[in-house]
Image: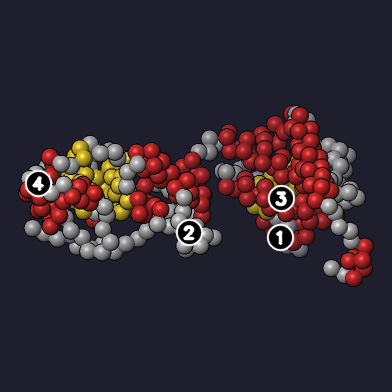
């Protein structure tokens, strides 16, 4: 901050800070309500044009409007509409080659007279590229050149001087979201599509499938229900970190039950050692809760919490086990921003897990 700016600055009381902050948000909120009420046929015309686009939606804008345009581009692209952002200043220095006749340009300029945007208009006309204008001036140069005009209407900026783009950019962002999400709904863009475009981060983890996270069968303890408990624990041993349950199957390989380390501990605590040489089928949990391949990990985590269980077998459509979700694979991961001394709450488990890749040990014989 310069000395001159510092000498003219003022301090606001907390009351004044809150009052002005609330005023800004209310003013922008009122503008959005007015914008929503003012949507008419032009919005539908824009939707029809963008929906029928055989190429890409090319979004352009300068300054703050350009930054909003980049966000709109990202929202379009992530919800099923092929979209790219083109900086108008770069466009007039060679990047116009990115625009083709089957593309549609969505240009943002509140005044409709932004120099860099207006300079594009003759070239767009030469390319015979259709143009959708998002502007607050329906009689501007941009509006006059457009095939469809999305008129934001008269907007008063929340800036005390009415200069800094604030309310106008909020309106642009909301209108861009409306375009993107209506188009997405028309394309029947579903969770499967969304997961394909969002494989990373919190969203990707929430949309992951159980087979992306589970321990595959080769890493699980698996045994026949016909064996004794003692034999099962010898035969189903695995090197490395083991799961808390043994998956039990019948002669056809279908899942019939699970037997957990907790079940074994209960036998020893109650001094029923003789049961160790009895059939495990007599003491296993029969018909355990399972999830089918293709289930979202988010749902698997909900089941673990609802049923208060620590192991969740994953089966195929024939009821044969293909892997296991172990609670330690879900809650052992901490948030990157959290101290290592802090545990992740169960409510945040869906945001905490990551797919794991473990070595595949050779299965013992005998």
Picture quadrant of residue 116:
bottom right
For the N terminus, give its image quadrant: bottom right
Residue 275: mark: 4
Q: Gap between marks 1 and 4, in whole Å?
A: 77 Å
Answer with left or right where residue 283 lies relative to residue 19: left
Q: Earlier in the sequence, mark 3 or mark 4?
A: 3
**Front disc: 3 or 2:** 2
Q: Gap between marks 1 and 3, in whole Å?
A: 17 Å
Q: Earlier in the sequence, mark 2 or mark 1?
A: 1
Residue designated by label 3: 69
Picture quadrant of residue 167:
top right
Q: Earlier in the sequence, mark 1 or mark 4?
A: 1
- Secondary structure at badge 1 equals helix
Q: Earlier in the sequence, mark 3 or mark 2?
A: 3
Q: Where is residue 56 in the image (x, y as percent from the top left)?
A: 63, 47
Q: Gap between marks 4 and 2, in whole Å?
A: 40 Å
Q: At 93% across and 62% down in the image, what residue appears? A: 8
**Front disc: 3 or 4:** 4
Picture quadrant of residue 5:
bottom right
For the C terminus, give its image quadrant: bottom left
In the depicted structure, whether residue 41 falls above or below residue 174: above
Residue 95: mark: 1
Residue 342: mark: 2
């Amino acid at each position: 901050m310069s000395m001159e700016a510092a000498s003219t600055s003022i301090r606001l009381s907390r009351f004044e800070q809150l009052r002005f902050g609330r005023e800004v948000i209310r003013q922008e909120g009122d503008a959005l309500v007015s914008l929503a009420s003012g949507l008419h046929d032009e919005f539908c015309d824009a939707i029809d044009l963008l929906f029928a686009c055989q190429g890409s939606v090319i979004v352009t804008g300068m300054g703050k409007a350009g930054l909003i345009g980049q966000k709109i581009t990202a929202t379009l692209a992530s919800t099923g509409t092929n979209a790219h952002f083109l900086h108008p200043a770069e466009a007039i220095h060679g990047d116009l080659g990115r625009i083709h006749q089957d593309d549609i340009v969505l240009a943002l300029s509140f005044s409709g007279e932004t120099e860099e945007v207006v300079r594009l208009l003759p070239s767009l006309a030469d390319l015979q590229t259709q143009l959708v204008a998002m502007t607050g001036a329906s009689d501007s140069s941009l509006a006059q050149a457009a095939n469809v005009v999305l008129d934001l209407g008269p907007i008063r900026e929340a800036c005390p001087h009415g200069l800094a783009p604030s309310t106008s950019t909020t309106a642009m962002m909301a209108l861009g979201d409306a375009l993107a999400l209506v188009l997405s709904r028309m394309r029947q863009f579903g969770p499967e599509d969304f997961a394909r475009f969002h494989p990373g981060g919190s969203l990707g983890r929430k949309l992951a499938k159980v087979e992306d996270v589970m321990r595959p069968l080769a890493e699980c303890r698996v045994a026949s229900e016909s064996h004794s408990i003692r034999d099962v624990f010898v035969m189903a041993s695995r090197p490395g970190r083991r799961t808390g349950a043994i998956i039990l199957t019948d002669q056809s390989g279908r899942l019939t039950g699970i037997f957990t380390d907790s079940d074994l501990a209960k036998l020893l605590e109650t001094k029923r050692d003789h049961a160790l040489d009895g059939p495990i089928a007599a003491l296993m949990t029969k018909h355990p809760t399972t999830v089918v391949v293709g289930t979202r990990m988010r749902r698997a985590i909900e089941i673990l919490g609802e049923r208060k269980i620590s192991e969740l077998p994953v089966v195929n459509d024939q009821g044969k086990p293909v892997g296991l979700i172990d609670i330690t694979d879900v809650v052992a991961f901490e948030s990157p921003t959290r101290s290592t001394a802090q545990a992740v709450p169960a409510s945040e488990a869906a945001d905490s897990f990551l797919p794991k890749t473990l070595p595949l040990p050779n299965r013992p014989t005998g």
